[in-house]
Amino acid sequence: MTNTLLVADIWSSLGMELEEYAFSINTIWVLITSALVFFMQAGFGLVEAGFTRSKNTTNILFKNLMDFVLGTIVFWAIGFGIMFGTRNGFWGGIDLFTRNAYRSDMPDMAFLIFQTVFAATAATIVSGAMAERTKVNAYLIYSGILTLIIYPISGHWAWGGGWLSQMKVPFHDFAGSSVVHMVGGMAAMMGALVLGPRIGKYDKNGKAKAIPGHNASLATLGVFVLWIGWFGFNPGSQLAAAGKVNATAISLIFVTTNIAAAGGALSTMLFVWFKYGKPTLSMTLNGVLAGLVAVTAGCDAVSPGGALIIGLMAGILVVLSVELFDKVIKIDDPVGAISVHGICGAFGTIMVGFFSTSQGLLYGNGGALLKSQLIGVGSIALWAITTAYILFRLLKYLNGLRVEKRIEEEGLDVYEHGETAYNN
C-alpha cells in the first residue's frame, strides 16, 4: 500500500512538473514570436521608405515608429478588452489596463504582448498607402483610433469569441489574412481615397504616371525582414510549442508560409516578365508579400501544395489589383498596400474554403466552410471600410488630412519634422 502511494505521488509530482514545463515552453515560444512580429515594424518601415521618395523618408519612418508606440498604449489600456472580453458576440467590453484573467495556458501578459504586435501591424499597413501627403497629426489620430476600437471589434468577432467564431462552421482565419491584413488594407484604401492622389501622379488626361521610389535596396531588405517576421506571425499564432501536436503544427505552418511566399514571388516575376518584357524587382517584392498575406489565414489548414497554389494565384492577383487601382479606379497607393494586404488578404481567407485539408471544397467536404469564409470576409471588410471612411472624412473636415501643396512638393521631412533622412 505504501509503495502504491509512493508511486502515485511520484507520478503526480512528475505530471505537475511536465505541466509547468509545457507552460514555460509555450510562454517562451509566444514571447519569441512576439519579438519576431515586432521586428516586422522595421520591415514595413524599410519597404515604405524604399518605395517612396527620399524627401519623405523621415516622415515614413516616424509614422511606423509611432504606430507601435501609440498601438502599445491604447491596445493595453482599452483595445485588448474590447477584443478579448466576453460581453457579447459584437464586442468584448471594457477592461481598463488589462487587469482581468484571460488565459490558463500562459501568462496573460504574454498573450497581451503577442496581440499588441498584431494590432500595431494592422495600423502600420495604412501608412504606405497614404504616404507623401498626409499630415502627421491627422495620421497619429487615425492610428490610435484603429488600434483602440476599429481593429479590436472585428478582431473580437473572429478571435475573441464573437459571432463569426460561433457560426455552425466557424470562420477560419488562423493568423490574420482578414483580421489583420485586410482590415489594414481596407482602411488604407479609404485613407488614400479621401486624401486623393499625389501631385503629379495623373496627367491632365487622367493617365497614371510612375513615381519611382528612391531606394530599391531598402525595399528589398524590408521584404526580407518581413519574410523573417512572418515566421513569428504565423507559427506564433499556434500559441503553443510544447508537445508533439504543437511541434507538428508549427512545423507545417513554417513550411506553408515559406512556400506561399516563394510561389507569390515566382508567379509575379513570370507574369510581369511575360506582360511587360522585363522581370521588375519592385513588383516581385510585392509578390512575396502577396503570397505571405494570402496564406496567413489557412497556413495551419492547407497542405504545402495548397499553399504553393495560393501563393501562385496571389502573385498574379496582386499585379492585376495594383493596375486596377492605379489605372482604372485611380486610387494612388505608393507601395501597393491596398492590393497586397486588402485584396490578397481577402482572397487568401476565401481560399481556405477551398484548400483546407479537413473542410475544404476541393477535398470533398461541401461548401459550408467556404460560406463561412465569405461571410467573414464580407462583414470584416464592410466594418473596416465604413468605419475608416467615416474617420478619415471627419479628420479631413475637422483637422485637414492633407499637407499644403508646397509641403508636398518640397517634402514632408523638413516641414513636418524639421529634419531630413539624408544629410550631405
Image (spheres, rainbow, N blue to C red):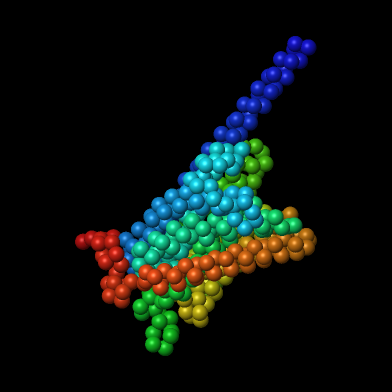
Residue placed furthest toward the top: 2
The one nearer the camera, 294 or 271, is 294
Residue at 55% over, 53% down: 82
Which residue shows up at 73% across the image and 19% down it? 8
x then y, percent, for residue 235 = 58, 48
Query: Where 139 falls versus 2 (above or below)?
Result: below
Viewer-proximal residue, 361 or 178?
178
Image-based side of 167 in relation to 385, left or right:
right
Rendering quarter of residue 181 = bottom right
From the top left corner, tell me how far across and down residue 172 is, in percent: 66, 57
Quadrant in the picture for the N terminus: top right
Q: Point out the residue furthest to the bottom here.
A: 205
| Count of number-bearing discs | 0
Task: Answer left or right for 378 relative to 205.
Answer: right
Residue found 70% across the figure and 62% down from its top: 372
Q: x%, y% of residue 313?
A: 60, 67
Residue 273 showing in the rendered view: no
Q: Residue at x 72, y 17 (%)?
A: 7
| Quarter of the view holding residue 47 | bottom left
Give the quadrant of the C terminus.
bottom left
* Residue 397 percent location from the top left of the image: 40, 73
Furthest residue in direction left, as rendered: 424
Q: Nearer the viewer, residue 5 or 201?
A: 5
Does residue 17 appear anywhere in the picture? yes
Residue 175 left/right relative to 353: left
